[in-house]
Amino acid sequence: MFQKMLENVRKNCPLIHNITNYVTVNDCANVVLACGASPIMADDKEEVAEITTICAGLNLNIGTLNGRTIEAMLIAGKRANELNHPVVLDPVGAGASKLRTETALKLLKEVRVSVIRGNISEIKTLALGSTTTKGVDADVADKVTEENLDEMLAFAKTFAKKTGAIIAITGAIDIVADDEKAYCIRNGHPMMSSVTGTGCQLSAMTAAFITANPTQMLEATAAAVCMMGYAGEIAYHRLGEMDGNATYRNYVIDVIYKMTPDNLEKGAKYEVR
């Protein structure tokens, strides 16, 4: 099944509009290219509606907010809704500041979002209004574990029902859920947390996957999450003695570029609940 998701990305090569943060914008563009789609980055309010119009999907990432980009995100999101284009929201650091939290909630209120992708602390902030955070990283107290997995699955499904969006919670165990069905994904490697922006890259890639598979967005989101995690596993095993996190980041993107649909299908580690 995930094989078909990647095949459709590479066959359709969707153009994805990214309003993302300046820490990871280059990596996001490269990972969209690596998976087989095409990126465009535009965040000025004077052009975002026009750019969104020529694209097929939209990725909104609040990692480096300012007043200018907040307005641009709202304009682009509403235009995407008018065109019935899928929208991914990455609420980076929601809970770390009032501005981030309020902006994420405003986007959820005013834009119809297809997928919300974040760590557990960010998702809990949007769902419950408050949580503990550690900057833009998940707080250890919120960690998804085998012991609390059933509880977290129920939480994700409930939030999916409330928002109408697919909820993708990434961490040591990833959860991708709509209101009825959830994928528990166990791909990935701990070293991914040593690279700034693997989550941002995943959100951009998720936008490509759901745009190329509009009738199977849950499965497409799960495929993107598996692909990023599996790439992290393979990239780790390529590292030499003197290689560090910068090399690892590049290897992850390289693996995504070289990933075949068959390899993704074989390497995906998930169960459905």
Image: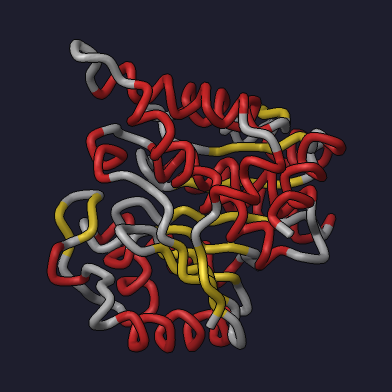
How far across and down, in percent of the image, does residue 143 sit? 22, 68
Left or right: residue 148 versus residue 153 is left
Q: Nearer the viewer, residue 76 or 140?
A: 140
> Which image quadrant is residue 101 in?
bottom left
How many discs appear? 0
Q: Nearer the viewer, residue 84 or 115?
A: 115
- The residue closer to the viewer here, 37 or 237, is 237
Q: Is residue 73 visible?
A: yes
Q: Position of residue 147 (x, y in %)?
A: 23, 82
Q: Position of residue 205 (x, y in %)?
A: 59, 42
Display coloring: secondary structure
**Residue at 33% of width from left, 17% of height from top?**
247
Which residue extends farthest front? 266
Residue at position x 69%, y 48% in the image: 209
Q: Which residue is rendered at x = 65% and y = 54% of the image?
A: 77
Residue 69 visible in the shown view: no
> Residue 219, how many percent across, how many down?
67, 64
Above/below status of 72 relative to 42: below
Say if 212 sits above or below 18 in the image. Answer: below
Extreme-top residue of the structure: 242
Where residue 189 sits, quadrant-wise, is: top left
Q: Is residue 32 above or below residue 5?
A: above
Q: Give whichever of 141, 267 is nearer the camera.
A: 267
Q: Is residue 258 above or below residue 189?
A: above
State the residue at coordinates (50%, 59%). Answer: 269
The quarter of the rendered structure image containing the N terminus is bottom right
Q: Is residue 204 left or right of residue 96?
A: right
